[in-house]
Image (spheres, grey):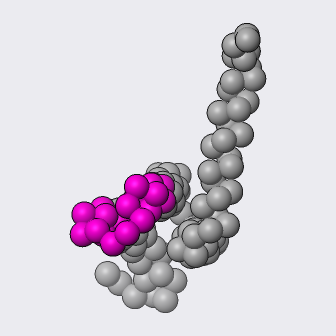
Amino acid sequence: MSRPSYIKSRYNSFRFAFKGLSSVFRSEPNMRLHVLASVVVVAMAYGLEVTRVEWCLLVLCIGMVWVAEIFNTSIETLTNLVSPEQNPLAGKTKDLAAGAVLMAAITSVVVGLFIFVPYWASYVHVEL
């Protein structure tokens, strides 16, 4: 049996990765909320004409939250596989993974406030 070609193995790697992304978008209601929040943030950033650096920070925050949610989903799935019964350590593992998503989201909200509040204040003519 021959080894798959380099191109075929790279193709398969991307195919499996996109399958994982598709799975998390289809199965996780929280991911849909993250997508909705991302769309709102991108629309506001576009409308307020934020700077390139601010765009970079916003994109990094969006990516951080999405990655945290994907890791959380994978950790929860693996935990369910190895510990289908109730187990305090399994529960703690899931709680820690969910906490990481919450921390990423809170951090992103803080960054968003630092970026958007001055734009909103100037829009309504309030001096900070």
Residue 76 visible in rendering: no
User: Is residue 20 toward the left or the right of residue 106 in the image?
Assistant: right
Reply above or below: 56 against 50. Answer: above
In the rendered image, the residue lying farthest to the top is 2
Q: Camera-side residue: 82 or 26? A: 82
Q: Is residue 93 magenta?
A: yes
User: Is residue 16 toward the left or the right of residue 102 in the image?
Assistant: right
Residue 38 visible in rendering: yes
Q: Residue at x 64, y 64 (%)?
A: 25
Q: Residue at x 67, y 67 (%)?
A: 26
Q: Position of residue 108 (x, y in %)?
A: 40, 66
Q: Position of residue 3 (x, y in %)?
A: 69, 13
- The image quadrant that residue 110 belongs to is bottom left
- The image quadrant that residue 104 belongs to is bottom left
Q: Residue at x 73, y 10 (%)?
A: 2
Q: Camera-side residue: 57 or 128? A: 57
Reply above or below: 56 against 73. Answer: above
Reply above or below: 105 against 13. Answer: below
- The image quadrant that residue 29 belongs to is bottom right
Q: Is residue 98 magenta?
A: no
Q: Residue at x 28, y 68 (%)?
A: 87
Q: Quadrant of the N terminus?
A: top right
Q: Quadrant of the C terminus?
A: bottom left
Q: Camera-side residue: 62 or 11? A: 11
Q: Camera-side residue: 18 or 76? A: 76
Q: Which residues are magenta?
A: 74-96
User: Is residue 126 toward the left or the right of residue 6 in the image?
Assistant: left
Magenta segment, prevailing SS (helix, strand or loop): helix
Q: Position of residue 15 (x, y in %)?
A: 71, 40
